[in-house]
Image (spheres, helix red, strand yellow):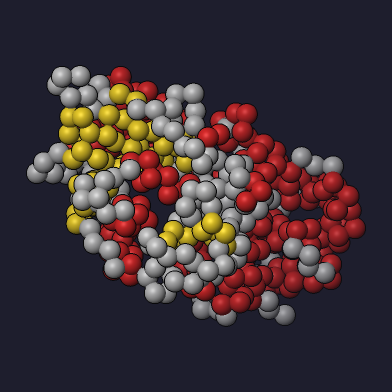
Amino acid sequence: MSDPTRDAAFSLLQAVFTKSASLDAALDALPAIEPRDRAAAHRLTACVLRHAGTLDTVLEPFLRREPPPAVRNILRLGAAAFLFLDTPPHAAVGTAVDLARSSKLEPFAGLINAVLRKVVAQGPGVLEELDMPRLDTPAWAWASWGKDARAIAEAHAHEAPLNISAMPGFTPEGGEALPTGSYRFPAGTAVAEVPGFAEGKAWVQDAAATLPAKLLAPKPGERVLDLCAAPGGKTAQLAAMGAQVTAVERDKTRMATLKGNLKRLNLAAETVLADATKWHPAEQFQAILLDAPCSATGTARRHPELLHLRKPRDFAAVTALQDKLLDAAAAMLAPGGRLIYAVCSLQPEEGAARIDAACARLGLKRDPLTLPELPEAVTSQGDVRTHPGMWTERGGMDGFFIARLVKPSAHD
């Protein structure tokens, strides 16, 4: 018998693991199903993606040979449902077997039934002996995160809460007020249900994502350049702080999203559809925010497929683009002006290494940051480095790297 949740989850896993699709793109490509089934499929898929290493380790003793990828994904779904999502044993096994039959994998139905019955009988005991954070983190990522690796990996096992930024003077009812000024709602909260969202008084933005604009600290009326601006959370922040914002974005679809968000919030900004590495403003800016394209590994709690899709070889291209954007931003920065560079990445090569290189290459100077509400995030160099293992008692935060640079003036 067909189970729409399992069918959809299987399609999502196949898209991620065999087509390297993002989970959001895979969700968009799903056929129309009930919202409840869609949400359940997303939850089950995300569970598999968060715990793929652990699930494969549990399954391993019960497999004599490597199954086809589609069969492994069905086994992962059944095991995840039972081990992590409290699905009754008969339902976890039965729906997996039915899924095999409906997916033209009938010859493997017996294998799936036998393996998952063993998971039901022995899996919980095996689970207790495993180092799940280590198993669920690719070796390259664990090595790159250094002393913070375990804290980050433990945070990745949990769904992220919903964070809201609010217009000045508005307090979303029912949200936990965070020291950084955001409001936090429990994981799974539908944004449409957040008080004030429909009225254009609030927008979705992780607590860590609010820090770049805060640390730029624009003065009311100050001209501020927001590079790589879509989807517009930081543009909205800057505009709500009273800045005169010019937002540059090269992607038409993402620019449309930015404009839509500003319209919903009744905020104004000049928008420029252009490649920031090639665009030349009529005059330089005293304040620039560059939230550069990156590997986005700092958002893996929200996008658990990322650590499966990213590979170390990917970073050379992204760091080269970051350098080009820093070069362009430096040319747009007025003498004496300040530049905030930010990435939602946990990778060191996208963070402090880019700033060290920019200072050496461009003559910019690091301007050390302070962050009284989150002092543990300030590095010895005066940059800010957040990660999901911070604020564990509050539900964590995204991983961000933020640095502030100044362009010396002629008399400096």
Question: In the shown orientation, is residue 139 left or right of residue 310?
Answer: right
Residue 66 versus residue 15 in the image, above or below: above
Q: Residue at x 47, y 64 (%)?
A: 171
Residue 119 in percent (x, y) is at 84, 56
Image quadrant assignment for residue 53? top right
Q: Residue at x 31, y 30 (%)?
A: 405
Residue 259 versus residue 241 in the image, above or below: below
Image quarter in which the C terminus is found: top left
Question: In the shown orientation, is residue 10 left or right of residue 28?
Answer: right
Residue 316 appears in the picture as rendered: no
Furthest toward the left, the residue is 282
Residue 359 appears in the picture as rendered: yes
Residue 373 in percent (x, y) is at 51, 41
Q: 68 or 381: which is nearer to us?
A: 381
Question: In the shown orientation, is residue 244 left or right of residue 207?
Answer: left
Q: Residue at x 90, y 58 (%)?
A: 121
Residue 368 in percent (x, y) is at 39, 28
Residue 224 in percent (x, y) is at 23, 46
Q: 166 or 329: which is nearer to us?
A: 166
Image quarter in which the N terminus is found: bottom right
Image quadrant assignment for residue 387? top right
Q: How many marks?
A: 0
Q: 119 or 336: which is nearer to us?
A: 336
